[in-house]
Amino acid sequence: MQLEKAMIEISVIVPTYNEEGNVMLLHRRLSEVMQQIGQPYELIFINDGSRDRTLELERELAKQDTHFRYIDLSRNFGHQIAVSAGIDASRGEAVVIIDADLQDPPELIVEMYAKLKSGFHVVYAKRKARQGESFMKKLTAKIFYRLLSRITSFSIPVDTGDFRIMDRKVVDALKQMPESNKFLRGQIAWIGFNQTFVEYERQQRHAGTTGYTYKKMINFAINGITAFSNAPIKCVTMAGFLVSFVAFLMIIMSFVVRIFYAHLSEPGWASIMVGLMFLGGVQLISLGIIGEYISRINTDVKRRPLYFIKETNLQNFE
């Protein structure tokens, strides 16, 4: 049995990476939620280079469930690209993004869908609490989202992830934004339209370990900041002016001391080294920030495809 394109009301996008312990339970809970809503739907699971049995389980689900679609990417492209692959394949008038770790409850989709149909274009899930996460992760996330919200020219919701539902108008707008370094929650906020939220308490991961290491989190934060703010470049400019001003004052002071207080003027190795190290540090940081922006430009100019599909059952639904 094939699902006709015109009949799809809700598409649920689930990026998966080493989620063999969660796939089956998540599928069951999502299916129950969709049956409760009572609208035609499709479940799109994107395997992002998993090394466990995730793909095998998704193949089995595809045989059992006519609503189930899977996409196996050619390698691990990252969470945001995997979600983008699902967005490209989605056909629903409403599109849900949810992670596979079951920290975000699928049952919340019922309330989110109801709010979407009341006149909103985006309904995102806002976390009241985050269970099972370290103090450091909570702290760094809190600082990052509030910093990003302050330095951008538009409002990016704080205490939110990618768990949300969007209507087709927003999805089509997202597909017109082909940048390689994705920061989807920022892109969705930038698009605008009527957006609101529902609150919930985020649960502990059901099984497995998170794929978001601190290194990936740092890269994700850098992508978010450089994609939607030029504040770092402005900071570099201000730092340059500040250092130049301080250097100018030091030159004047040196002349004054040399002329009027010659007996106090003695060459000092320490002061020279401190000055050199300070200027060198500012220059290196400045070059690094500028390099991040240039790297983004270089990546986007190449216009390489965001991902490649190795295996899928998409053709069964065309």
Image (cartoon, rainbow, N blue to C red):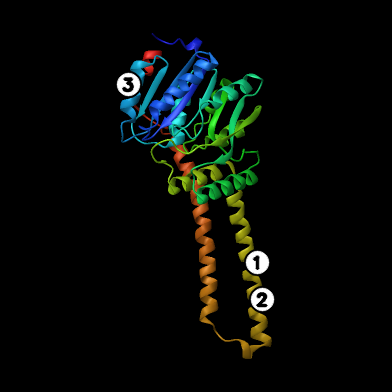
The label shown at residue 60 is: 3
Position of residue 93 measured from the top left corner of the image (x, y, whole percent)? 55, 17
Secondary structure category for the residue under label 1: helix
Q: Can residue 134 be seen in this view?
A: yes
Dots 2 and 3: beta carbons under 8 Å?
no
Pointer 3: residues within 10 angstroms few (<14), some, or many (20+)? few
**What is the C-alpha distance between the residues marked 3 and 1?**
67 Å
Position of residue 32 measured from the top left corner of the image (x, y, whole percent)? 48, 19
Pointer 1: residues within 10 angstroms few (<14), some, or many (20+)? few
Compared across the picture, whether 111 is left or right of 66 comes to: right
Identify the residue under disc 2: 252
Instruction: Give the amino acid type for the residue marked by disc 2 in the picture.
Output: Ile
Q: Which of marks 1 and 2 is nearer the N terminus?
A: 1
Identify the residue under disc 1: 245
Q: Residue at x 49, y 54 (%)?
A: 288
Instruction: Give the amino acid type for the residue marked by disc 3 in the picture.
Output: Glu
Question: Which of the pair 254/188 is nearer the observer?
Answer: 188
Pointer 2: residues within 10 angstroms few (<14), some, or many (20+)? few
User: In which quarter of the view is residue 254 placed?
Assistant: bottom right
Please name which of the two marks, 2 or 3, marks the residue nearer to the observer: 3
Compared across the picture, whether 74 is left or right of 291 comes to: left
User: In which quarter of the view is residue 74 placed?
Assistant: top left
Question: Which of the pair 8/73 is nearer the observer?
Answer: 8
Secondary structure category for the residue under label 2: helix
